[in-house]
Image (cartoon, rainbow, N blue to C red):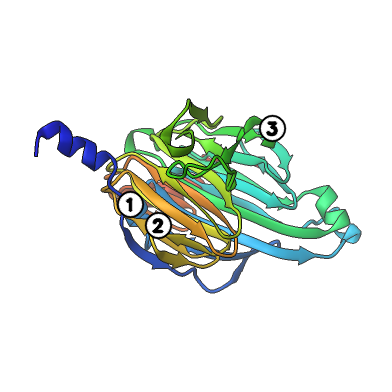
């Protein structure tokens, strides 16, 4: 087989499902976030680096609590170092504040991208309006590892409003039909899709978030009984985290809060939603560096963790 023919064939090669992984048992983070951890830096995060942790809080109904306006549910002041937290709100509202002076509230469709870098203190609570009125709370938080060279970068904060993220009408590029089968929002990275059957112009959308590693974070819904094909770069880590419904990836089914991990080889994969599905697509250039994690700190070596705890004790993370 000629070299260029083989290369073209590889471009069309599907990724293979390496495993479908269940979440941790439900647990509470503070008194505001009923969480299941889909993966952490102690397990799948080692394979999916730079994606090192994903928690899904909810969906859970909270009653109105006007009596808690001064003491809202949530998580009080706590530190982070060495990575970025990406909070994606599907339902409810989250209020944030940190020792770098950033604060704000995010609601459905919004994203908060916080770079902890060399160290930050922050807190997360139910926002005042949600505390007062109650409702369904549904939030995902993703931790993205920082490369060793950037772990001590200055803390930063990117508030990304829903209006900043263009929603793309998802079709099946391998079908002759131009039927819309779902939608896709690009939070970070890029998404490109050709017209039905590979004909027509190509749609390219770029997400608003800035990252230290080349990556894509897509928020996707697929309608009941529909299917599509998504493309991603050869050699990248790839995972699909099911936020709701059930998703079939290359013939393998993943339920709500399960993580479907795909091979690095291949550049495309077929998805189907027998009952409808909401999921995150996470793809990235692999970060081939050691992980040393302890609680809210993720570094490369154990000694760096000891230094983080010492810096926290000495007040080097600021005040909040």
Taking the image as shown, residue 201 lies to the left or right of residue 160, namely left
User: Residue 22, percent across and down?
Assistant: 46, 70
- Closer to the camera: disc 3 or disc 1? 3
In this rendered view, identify the residue nearer to me: 261 or 315.
261
N-term mark: 3 or 2: 2
Q: Residues within 10 Å of mark 2 (few under 14, many from 20)?
A: many
- In the image, farthest residue toward the top: 201
Residue 63: which quarter of the image?
bottom right
Q: Which mark is residue 291?
A: 1
Q: At numbered mark 3, what does the secondary structure look like: helix, strand or loop?
A: helix
Relative height, residue 24 to residue 101 (above, below)? below
Q: Which element carries disc 2, helix, strand or loop?
A: loop
* 87 lies left or right of 314: right
* Image spot of residue 23 (x, y percent): 49, 68
Identify which residue, 136 or 53, lies in the foreground: 136
Placement of the N terminus among the 4 image quadrants = top left
* Residue 282 location (% of width, % of height): 45, 47
The reply to whether residue 21 is visible in this rendering is yes
Quadrant (top left/top right/bottom left/bottom right) for the C terminus: top right
Judged by depth in the image, the label closer to the viewer, 3 or 2, is 3
Q: Earlier in the sequence, mark 3 or mark 1?
A: 3
Marks 2 and 1 close (CB-CB < 8 Å): yes
Image height of 141 relative to 188, above or below: below
Please tell me whether mark 1 sits on a helix, a strand or a loop: loop
Q: Residue at x 48, y 37 (%)?
A: 196
- Name the residue carrying label 2: 41
Residues at circles 3 and 1 in contact by the CB criterion of under 8 Å? no
How much space separates mark 3 and mark 2, taking CA atoms? 32 Å
Q: CA distance from mark 2 to mark 1?
A: 7 Å
**Which residue is labeled 3 in the image?**
163
- Toward the right, the furthest residue is 66
Is tag 2's residue or tag 1's residue first in the polypeptide sequence? Answer: 2
């Amino acid at each position: 087989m000629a070299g260029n023919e083989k290369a073209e064939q590889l471009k069309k090669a599907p990724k293979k499902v390496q495993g479908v992984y269940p979440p941790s048992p439900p647990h509470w983070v503070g008194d505001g976030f009923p969480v299941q951890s889909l993966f952490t830096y102690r397990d799948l995060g080692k394979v999916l680096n730079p994606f090192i942790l994903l928690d899904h809080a909810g969906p859970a109904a909270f009653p109105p609590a006007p009596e808690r306006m001064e003491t809202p549910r949530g998580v009080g002041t706590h530190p982070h170092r060495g990575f970025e937290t990406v909070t994606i709100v599907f339902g409810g509202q989250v209020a944030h504040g940190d020792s770098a002076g950033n604060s704000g509230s995010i609601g459905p469709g919004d994203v908060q991208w916080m770079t902890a870098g060399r160290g930050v203190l922050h807190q997360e609570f139910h926002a005042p309006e949600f505390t007062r009125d109650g409702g369904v709370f549904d939030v995902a938080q993703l931790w993205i590892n920082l490369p060793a060279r950037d772990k001590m970068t200055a803390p930063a904060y990117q508030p990304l409003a829903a209006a900043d993220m263009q929603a793309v009408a998802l079709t099946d590029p391998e079908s002759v039909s131009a039927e819309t089968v779902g939608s896709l929002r690009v939070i970070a990275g890029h998404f490109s899709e050709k017209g039905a059957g590979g004909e027509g112009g190509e749609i390219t959308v770029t997400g608003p978030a800035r990252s230290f590693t080349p990556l894509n974070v897509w928020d996707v819904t697929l309608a009941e009984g529909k299917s599509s094909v998504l493309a991603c770069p050869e050699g990248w880590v790839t995972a699909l985290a099911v936020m709701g419904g059930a998703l079939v990836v290359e013939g393998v089914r993943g339920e709500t809060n399960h993580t479907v991990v795909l091979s690095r080889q291949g550049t495309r994969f077929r998805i189907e939603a027998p009952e409808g599905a909401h999921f995150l697509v996470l793809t990235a250039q692999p970060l081939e560096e050691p992980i040393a994690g302890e609680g809210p700190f993720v570094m490369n070596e154990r000694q760096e963790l000891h230094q983080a705890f010492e810096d926290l004790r000495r007040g080097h993370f600021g005040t909040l």
